[in-house]
Image (cartoon, grey):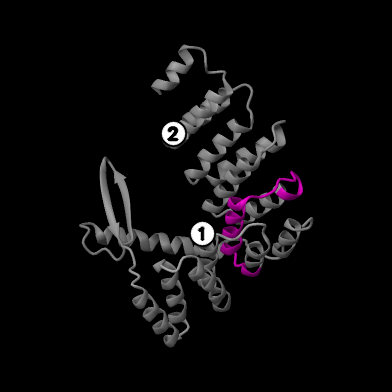
Amino acid sequence: ECFHSYVIKYGFDSNQFIGASLVELYSRCGSLGNASKVFDEISLKDTVVWTSLITGYGIHGKGAKALETFNHMVKSSEVKPNEVTFLSILSACSHSGLIHDGLRIFELMVSDYRLVPNLEHYAVLVDLLGRVGELDTAFEITRRMPFSPTTQILGTLLGACRIHQNGEMAETVAKKLFELESNHAGYYMLMSNMYGVKGEWENVEKLRNSVKNRGIKKGLAESLIEIRRMVHRFVADDNLHPEKETVYGLLKQLGLHMKEDLENSVYFNSEGDSLCDSVYAEA
């Protein structure tokens, strides 16, 4: 706010670059109301200004607002979205569970705006497809995209395989992951859990022996959250926190709500193959 006051005092508030920076600063601080206010006061909005607000909504889980802003930009502005804009809105859709909208926007980016997706766009696309169970299409994307898939992309796909219990594809993806990052304990744990669910205890034992022989150790999973200037630390299966019963009770309620929302969602069913084909129509 001090910086904003300085900008206004010395007449820089009409500068697009400074305006975009203010929108980003307010957004990162969680002050989306001020970010939106600054945005509205900028008379000539360029792509950077629009993208700054979309990104701000996205990083704070306001996917619907990010989508609303993007649609307003496309329909009511002469400014065209660029690769960064599309990455921001795709990430916002992914984080907010707006799967159908995210897939539609990716196709819009490729088909209407003729923009070439980069590795980050493909990473979000694989995540979107994995969330709705379009594993074959997601796998085909990783195989046909003009980049070698990173461990992040393959790890996302492996996680989707676990959720949708596609053991055959999981083994293929895991094999590639083990080649790229052989000492990552998380990938071994994912596969071990999948084998355990299917009762394939021989494979579970083979993975455990492989982890032991390689000397791989699973890192301690922990989360940190600051409330009223006090940092609370949580670890996996934490039984030491003084308010553990309240925390686990709330998590259980959230899990039930998420499961209910998942069951009531309208999924992207039949367009998966056509999306993949549209991405590579000119390949």
Q: Nearer the viewer, residue 218 or 1?
A: 218
In the image, the segment drawn in magenta is 110-136
Residue 63 place in picture, x, y as percent: 55, 46
Vertical relation: 1 (above or below) 173: above
Residue 152 numbered mark, or none? 1
Residue at image position (37%, 63%) is 252
Image location of residue 275, percent across then percent down? 72, 59
Q: Residue furthest bottom?
A: 202
- Left or right: 70 with respect to 18? right
Magenta-span inclusion, residue 67: no
Residue 113 covered by magenta stretch = yes
What mark, if any, has residue 76 been given in the picture? none
Residue at numbered disc 2: 31
In which quadrant will I find the C terminus?
bottom right
Image quadrant where residue 83 sits: top right
Q: Is residue 273 above or below residue 82?
A: below
Residue at the spot x=61%, y=56% of the render? 125
Q: Amino acid at mark 1?
A: Gln
Main secondary structure of the magenta stretch: helix
- 15 lies left or right of 141: left
Callout 2 amino acid: Ser
| Cα distance between the residues tagged 1 and 2 | 30 Å
In front here: 80 or 66? 80
Query: Which of marks 2 and 1 precedes in the sequence?
Result: 2
Near-viewer residue (119 or 109):
119
* SS for dot 1: helix
Q: Give coordinates of residue 42: x percent, y percent.
A: 58, 23
Dot 2: within a 10 Å radius of its alpha carbon, few (fewer than 14), some, or many (20 or more) residues? Answer: some
